[in-house]
Image: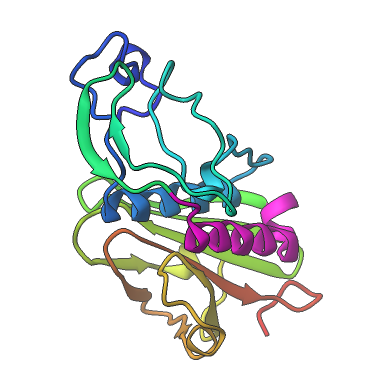
Amino acid sequence: FEYDDGEAVRPSHNPKYDTSGPTSDDRLIQRLVALFQFTVPGAPMLYYGTEAGMFGADDPDDRMPMIWDDLKYEAHTLGAFGQSVPEYPIAFDHQLYDYYRRLIQLRTDRMALRRGDYRNLLADEQSQTLLFCRRYKKEVLLIALNRGQEQATIKLNPADYGLPVGKQMHLVFSTQQDQSTARLASATIRTQKTGLTWDLPALTGQVWNLELDRSGESK
């Protein structure tokens, strides 16, 4: 990424920087970034309009007026310095707004995300995957992110990281838009002594829950 990388993301210094509207993959990446932001230690912060689907580069392209749900807007056709860009409709993004609401609820419901320990479990540059654990008392969460354009297979030996074996993990959050309560509840993985393996779709993030009892052993 070149996110916030000095002059590379400043239209005033880099005339080739693309300030046109986000693609569908761009939105999937935004969901991944948001999931990472809401699951690592520290309080997440959103710049105004991010939850509504606003976009832009660094100054002066990040000072556009807020998009409101009850107003209609002309399409985006000009870049930061008046150059023509592909036409892009401007409207309040309800799906993205609901996604951020779910993220906030996830962080509110899961104490491990607010006060838990953090531990990296896997970082694979080739497959562009990241797996880390947040743990607080009897709650253990595994967060898996796939930035790659291809499905990735996550392989992990739970015993190497002090995670119990022979127990089920339940999917509690996914960046995929077709998420439903029933679909999440039916998604489970059993940790095995031989290792933990599952397939993570491209440009997708997931949060898995493995609860512990009061003694710290898995249920």
Q: Residue at x 76, y 64 (%)?
A: 137
> As displayed, is residue 1 above or below residue 200?
above
The question of residue 101 being in magenta is answered with yes
Q: Residue at x 20, y 56 (%)?
A: 149
Question: Which corner quadrant holds the C terminus?
Answer: bottom right
- Side of 25 where 69 appears, left or right: right
- Side of 43 where 67 appears, left or right: left
Residue 123 visible in rendering: no
The question of residue 183 being in magenta is answered with no
Question: Which corner quadrant holds the N terminus?
Answer: top left
x and y percentages locating residue 61 in the rendered image: 41, 22
x and y percentages locating residue 108 in the rendered image: 74, 60
Span highlighted in magenta in the image: 91-116
> As displayed, is residue 177 above or below residue 189?
above
Chief secondary structure of the magenta portion: helix
The residue lying furthest to the top in this view is 13
Q: Residue at x 28, y 56 (%)?
A: 24
Q: Residue at x 48, y 87 (%)?
A: 183
> As displayed, is residue 9 above or below residue 217?
above
How many numbered circles are shown? 0
Q: How is the image coloured?
A: rainbow
x and y percentages locating residue 69 in the rendered image: 58, 53
In the picture, residue 98 is in which quadrant? Answer: bottom right
Taking depth in this image into account, of 67 and 218 the one nearest to the observer is 67
x and y percentages locating residue 7 in the rendered image: 32, 12
In the picture, residue 198 is in which quadrant? Answer: bottom left
> As displayed, is residue 153 above or below residue 131?
below
Taking depth in this image into account, of 38 and 143 the one nearest to the observer is 38
